[in-house]
Amino acid sequence: MSDLEARLRAIGAERYHHRHPFNLRMHAGQLSREELQSWVANRYYYQTRIPLKDGLILAKSGDPAFRRDWIGRIHDHDGTPDRQGGLELWLALARAVGLDEQRVASLGDVLPGVRRACDAYVEFVESHDLLASVASSLTELFAGDIMGERIAAFEKHYPWVDADGLRYFRSRTVQAPADARYGLAFVVEHARTREDQDRCAAALERKCEILWGLLDAIEHAHAVPRFARAAQPRLDDPEPLVVLPERAVKLSGSAREMLALVDGKRAAIEIAAAVRGRHREVERVAGDVHDFLDEMVRLGVLERGIRS
Amino acid sequence: MSAPRPYNLIAELTYRCPLRCVYCSNPLGYRAVRDALDGAAWARVFGEAAELGAVHVGLTGGEPTLHPDLEAIVAGAARASLYSHLVTAGTTLDRDGLAALARAGLRSVQLSIQDADATASDEIAGTECFEAKLAFASSVRELGIPLTLNVVLHRHNLARVAEIIALAQRLGAARLELANAQYQGWALRNRTALLPTRAQLDAAAREVTRLRAEVRDVEILFVLPDYHRDRPKPCMGGWGRQSLVVAPDGRVLPCHGAAELPGLEFWRVPERSLAECWSDAPGMNAFRGEAWMPLPCRDCPERAVDFGGCRCQAFALTGDPAATDPACSLAPAHDVILRAREAAAEPATAFVYRGSQ
C-alpha cells in the first residue's frame, strides 16, 4: 500500500460517517420509524446530486479512457434501458420504509442543513480540479463495509422494512469497491508531489465533513430542543428576550413564536411542523425553523436532548 | 431627555477585597467608600432596576462575597427576575456557601484568574490564591453553574494565552474572557509595568485565532485594547445608555470609574429612587447622547459605534473629561498614547499594588 493510500485510509477510519452517532444508532437498531424515514427521504437528495457531481468530473477530463470508465457511475445512478439505477432503487427503499415515493422525489421535505451539505459537495467539485474532485469521491473506499453492516442491521432491527427496499445497499456493496479501486488508482498515479497529495487528503477530509454534516442535520431535526440551564427566557416581556451569562438575545416576533414551542417534549421537526401549520403562506418556513433552532443552540440559548 | 433602558445593572456590593491586583478597576480612593446598602436595600434597588427594564445583574466589587447579606441579595435578584451573575476572585467562598447561593437563585459565575502559572498569577494578585481559585472553579462546575473565566492580559502573560485557554478547558468554563487590561485606576498607575507591545498582542491574537478553530467547548473572547487600535473602545456601550452601576455607597453611576471625575453630581439610593438617579442626575446626563461631543467626534461617522470612547480615560490622560478619548488617532492628545506605546518596548517597571500609597 502506498503512503498516500495509507494516509487516505486513515482519514476515512477517523472521519467517515460510519462513526457518526446517528449511523451508530441506525446500525444498533435504535432509530425510531420517523428517524429512519427521515434519513431515507433526506439522503435521497444526496443521491440526486451524485450524477450532477459525476457529470462535472467527466467534463474535467480530456482522457477518453477515463471518461469511458467514469460515465459508468452516471449509468449506475440514473439507470439504463435494461437496468434500474441507484435513484430508482433508493425510491424503492423509500416505499419500503413506508414513504410516499413521489413526495420523496419532489425533495419538498429536505432539511436545509442536508441541502447545504449536498450542494457543498457539488460546489466543491465545481471549483476544484480533476485530481481533487476524484479524491473527494474516495469515501467510496469505506462505503462497501458500511453497506454490508447496514443490510444486516436492517434485517435484524427493522424487520418492518420490505426486503425489496434493500436492493440499493446490495448494489453498492459491489459498485462502491470497484469505483473506489479505480478512483484510488487514479489518485495514487496522479498525485506525485507532496502538494498534490496534501490537496487529495484535504479533499477527502472535506468530503467526510460534508457527509458528517448531512447526518448532523438529520440528527438535530429529531432531537428535542430545550432551554439551556444558563438561559433565562423572558418570552412574555413586551420586548421578548433570552438572558444568558453576560449577554441577552433579543427576539423578533417569529423568534418568540418558535421559542414558545420549545417545551422539552417536541422535537425540532415537530416545532417546524407546528410553525408551518400556522404560516402556510410562507415558503420554506419549516427549513427556517431548523436553521433558527440551530442558531439558538450555537448561541447557548438551547441545547439538544434525545427523545427519551 | 427621556432616559434609555438600562438592560444591565452592575451592583458593586463592596470595594473590600483580599486581593491587591495591580490593574484593579476600583477607584484609587476606594477606601473612603463605605458599604451603605444591606440585603434589603439591595433588594429594593433590584426591584426598581427591573421596573426600569434591567434583566441582568452583575454582583461585583471588590469581592462581592464579603458582603454579609450576599444570600439575601441573590434571593432579591431572583425575586425581581434579574439574571444574577457573581463576579468573584473565588478565594472567600466555600462550596457550601456557593451551593446556598445557587439555591437562592444564582444563575452564573465569573471567576477571575490572573495567569495560567501559579507563581505569576499570585504575583499579579499580590497574594497567594491560585490554588484556591482552581478549587472554587471545581465547586462551580460540580454545582452545574455556568462558569466564565476572566483573565486580564498584559505584557507578563500574553505569551501564555494557549496555556490560559487550556486551563479554561480543564476547569470546564463555558466562556473565557481574555480581557486586555484597561488602563484606568490602578492599571494606569501600573501602565509602564503592564502595557504590552503591539508585537506581543499580535502574536497572542494569532494564537487565539488558531485555538478558536480547535477549541469547541469554550467560547473565547479577545478584543484588541484601545491603546493599540487607534480607535476608542465603546466604553460601557455608551454613557448612561444600557448599563447602570450602583456603587457600595449607593451612588448611581454610568461606569465603575465615573465617581472620580470632577464636577459631576451623581445621586444615591435610597435617598432618591433609582429611576431619578438614572434619568435625572446631572452627572448621568453630562455625557449622554452626542450633544457634549467636541470635534472631531461630533461629525465622526463612528460616533454611533464607539459613543465617543471613555470619559474616564479622557480625564485621566488630558485633565478634561469632555475631551476626545486620546486612544483615537484623530484626538488632539493622541500623542500621549503613542508615547505609552513606545514605552511598552522598554523594560517593565515594578508593580504598585492596589492599596499601596
Image (cartoon, helix red, strand yellow):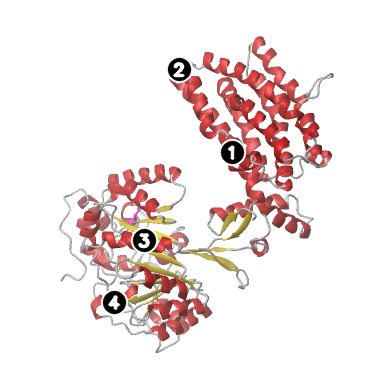
Q: Secondary structure at mark 4?
A: loop
Question: CA separation, marks 2 and 1?
Answer: 29 Å
Q: Chain of mark 3?
A: B
Image-quadrant location for residue B333: bottom left
Which tag is nearer the camera, tag 2 or tag 1? 1
Question: Badge 1: few (under 14), some or many (20 or more) residues near its Cα, within 10 Å?
Answer: many
Q: Which mark is residue A212?
A: 1
Q: What amino acid is labelled 1 in the image?
A: Trp
Residue topped by disc 2: A193
Frontmost residue, B318 versus B128? B128
Question: CA separation, marks 4 and 3?
Answer: 40 Å
Which tag is nearer the camera, tag 3 or tag 1? 3
Q: Is residue B113 above or below residue B158?
A: below
Q: Is residue B267 above or below residue A217?
A: below
Q: Chain of mark 1?
A: A
Marks 4 and 3 in Cβ contact (< 8 Å): no
Q: Is tag 2's residue or tag 1's residue first in the polypeptide sequence?
A: 2
Image-quadrant location for residue B72: bottom left
Residue topped by disc 3: B137
Q: Residue at x 79, y 56 (%)?
A: A280
Question: Badge 4: few (under 14), some or many (20 or more) residues near its Cα, within 10 Å?
Answer: few
Question: Badge 2: few (under 14), some or many (20 or more) residues near its Cα, within 10 Å?
Answer: few
Question: CA separation, marks 2 and 3?
Answer: 50 Å
Q: Position of residue B136 (x, y in %)?
A: 34, 63
Which residue range is magenta in the image? B222-226
Image-quadrant location for residue B22: bottom left
Q: Chain of mark 2?
A: A
Frontmost residue, B219 versus B10? B219
